Amino acid sequence: MATPNLSVVIPVYNEEASLPTLFARLYPALDALGTTYEVIFVNDGSRDRSAALLREQWERRPDTTRVVLFNANYGQHPAVVAGFEHCRGERMVTMDADLQNPPEEIAKLLAAMDAGHDYVGGVRRRREDSWFRRLASRAMNRVRERITRIHMTDQGCMLRAYSREIVAAVAASREVSTFIPALAYTFAHKPAEVAVAHEERAAGDSKYSLYRLIRLNFDLVTGFSLVPLQMFSMFGILVSITALVTYLVVILQRLVLSGWREGFATLWDRDILAFFLIGVMLFGLGLVGEYVGRIYQQVRHRPRYTVRAVLERESTQADEPRS
Ligand code: UDP
Ligand code: MG
């Protein structure tokens, strides 16, 4: 298989019910693009017949199909990372296997890339999910917008396109748990968004329980922001300052009302002292958090930056010693 123009990465976990429909719609949609492509399915340790179905599809379209089989279930985002590592296309598109992302919409993402963008995120026009999921998503989008430097309208939409440079940077990040659209965004230099359609799940059930959704959002928040750690210091400082003010007020009050002896004894007032010390402790905890945060950033092995180009003469006479 020569280098295709487009790689489509699809994580698959227990999707035997939707795979036949997916194959039937995906390949014609991609053929219609009139470009060379490959589809990479990553089977995330499915326990149903998904792996067998993927193998059949691979035998049917070996020219354009590649399948990566995980030995166990690692989660959607690790599966997508495997796609980043294996894909060969000039551009890459990720989407879900349940047809909630209509394959016919890929053309819109590619059009935005033709316009010079290196990262194109889909924004679901009308989301076909339960009200609870929509509400939770909206809340998380807002939290992310405030505490990280990642700006996107619809972080949950997996219909996204990435340039080769971003794919390489993500593949080079040796992170254990992460939220791929956000990680890729940090490497983008000209991101864009396009509205895409969203459909109800073709078949089967959502693979995300409430617990897994919460875990995923923890990955997002802790992976891209130290704010949760820093909140401790901030809160500690606030408590300490309030305690000091309380001290002053109470000391003054007692000085005026009951003389200097009482006023001085206030310093040992148990309640205010405890208040103050808790503030100091929280601040200390936050300080430790600062260091832990730095260690955390260091061990992630994220590329610190990606270079788009270096302008320099290859080997120049100027470098040679002048005689
Ligand atoms: N998925 C996966 N591993 C998992 C959970 C999900 O590969 O542990 C895949 C799943 O097969 C689908 C995509 O991730 O292609 C999105 O999952 P789902 O549709 O269940 O999520 P939802 O749409 O409910 O957010
Ligand atoms: Mg889905």
Image: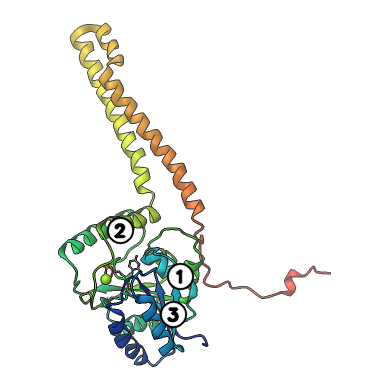
Q: Earlier in the sequence, mark 3 or mark 2?
A: 3
Q: Earlier in the sequence, mark 2 or mark 1?
A: 1
Q: Alpha-carbon distance for marks 1 and 3? A: 15 Å
Mark 2: secondary structure: helix
Circle 1 crowding by C-alpha within 10 Å: few under 14, some 14–19, many from 20: many
Q: Nearer the viewer, residue 203 or 307?
A: 203
Q: Give the residue at mark 1.
A: 82
Residue 244 visible in rendering: no
| Disc 2 within 8 angstroms of ligand 1 (CB) | yes
Q: Alpha-carbon distance for marks 3 and 2? A: 29 Å
Q: Is residue 128 above or below residue 259?
A: below
Q: Give the residue at mark 3.
A: 91
Identify residue type, mark 2.
Answer: Arg
Q: Could you say where residue 219 lies in the image, as x and y percent from the top left?
A: 36, 56
Circle 3 crowding by C-alpha within 10 Å: few under 14, some 14–19, many from 20: many
Identify residue type, mark 1.
Answer: Ala
Residue 275 visible in rendering: yes
